[in-house]
Amino acid sequence: MSALVTQEPAADLLHRYSFPQSDCSQIPYGMYRDPDIYALEQEKIFRGPVWNYLALECEVPKPGDFRVIAVGDTPVIVNRAKDGSIHAVVNRCAHRGATVQRQLHGNTKVHTCCYHQWSFDLTGKLVGIPFQRGVNGIGGLPADFDKSCHSLQRLRIETLNGVIFGTFSDETAPLVEFLDVPFVTQLKRLFHKPVRVLGYQRQRIFGNWKLYSENLRDPNHGGLLHMFQITFGIARLNGKGGATLDSEGKHNMSWAAQGGRKDGEPEPAKDAGYGDTGRGDMNIKLRDPSLLTYRHEYPDDLTLTIASIFPNCCFQQIGNTLAIRQFRTTSADECEVVSTFYGYEDDDEGMARHRLRMANLAGPAGLVSMEDGEAVELVHRAIVRDTDKHSVVAFGGVGAVKDQENLVTDVPMRGFWIHYCKLMGIETGASA
């Protein structure tokens, strides 16, 4: 356990905080702020038996194209090799451990470390070492040095409809099994035809990555925190919506839809349930409502889907704006969210412009989501001296984790934590 900040044995570390309920309806605050827990997460979660989102195939269309990303806090290069195959390797030189590729993206024949100029091909194989034999027969590496033993560390990869996932573990189940039927279906829905990237946003959040992951699995906050969303009816808690989980509860898709209420069920008043919240006038109108116009493009009535894939990403549809948010950890106290906005290759100019305009709803300054980062930071700062206390995660009921037919629920958060504790080896419940 040399990666831990302390030398405390892992078994003792995992008993440092208690989960009083086996259904994870009470979360110890210490799990968000502890640097030892953070270090263990890098081994058990991000390098554990999970598939991490890496990139889109369209981001590396030609041989030699690459992107530099991160899995947890491990730097990774994703690139396309000469034969068209895609590879993911750790961006750390096999010689002295320096960063090899320092550009965020580009095209190259080899990745060369600036420190001592060791070079690696697009599969991660070590192909070049300056002065390997020394100078005039003096110095250099031993005669039996084998370059094939010093490649860049490789990740296993699988793709689904042009979406690239990677894993460090040989024990990770096949991707479609890991995602499970609802999320294979959702990715095939979103990536049913070729896509093209429209742009990127990066957001630095001074809070723990799990708080952000919880936020994505918390449909309850969407109709209370986000004033723009409430005021203009993008997704109110009294509308049609819910949450879909995989069989283990680790993934979640919060969704909202237009119309389609049950037979005989009246449409609720706009302010139904909001009377005591002080959330403002719901009759305000936009001067230009085209910002929120949804152009129907899928064979269903879903207008908002936030599909959170354990552990490091979510696939977002807010109206016609489509994006993938990948969160990268920096420390127990900081993370970065990188959003990739995309559309379809056959979008006409009008649709492409519409998607870009609707993109103003999301991101660090988005009309809908700008509050998320601040909410994460508010929690992270407030719990600093009470790590033995617990949050209450009980909306939607306690006990079994299952699909939800409304948006007033915390159940998807509990699904995340149950799987998290399983991977970390944390016992939950009164007997823990």
Image: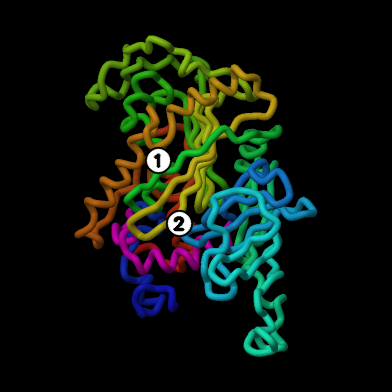
Q: Give the total of numbered labels.
A: 2
Tag 1: residue type? Asp
The question of residue 42 being in magenta is answered with: yes
Residue that mark 1 sits on: 218
Horizontal arrangement in the rendering, residue 261 relative to residue 374 (left or right): right
Q: Foreground mark, 1 or 2?
A: 1
382 vs 147: above or below: above
Residue that mark 2 sits on: 418
Identified at 36% across, 80% down, the residue is 7
285 vs 97: above or below: above
Tag 2: residue type? Ile
Kindly indicate the quadrant of the structure image that contains residue 14: bottom left
Q: Give the range drawn in magenta.
A: 26-50
x then y, percent, for residue 397: 38, 43
x then y, percent, for residue 41: 45, 64
x then y, percent, for residue 378: 26, 45
Question: Which colour assignment does the render follow?
Answer: rainbow
| 10 Å crowding of disc 2: few (<14), some (14-19), many (20+) | many
Identified at 62% across, 56% down, the residue is 166
Q: Nearer the viewer, residue 394 or 141?
A: 141
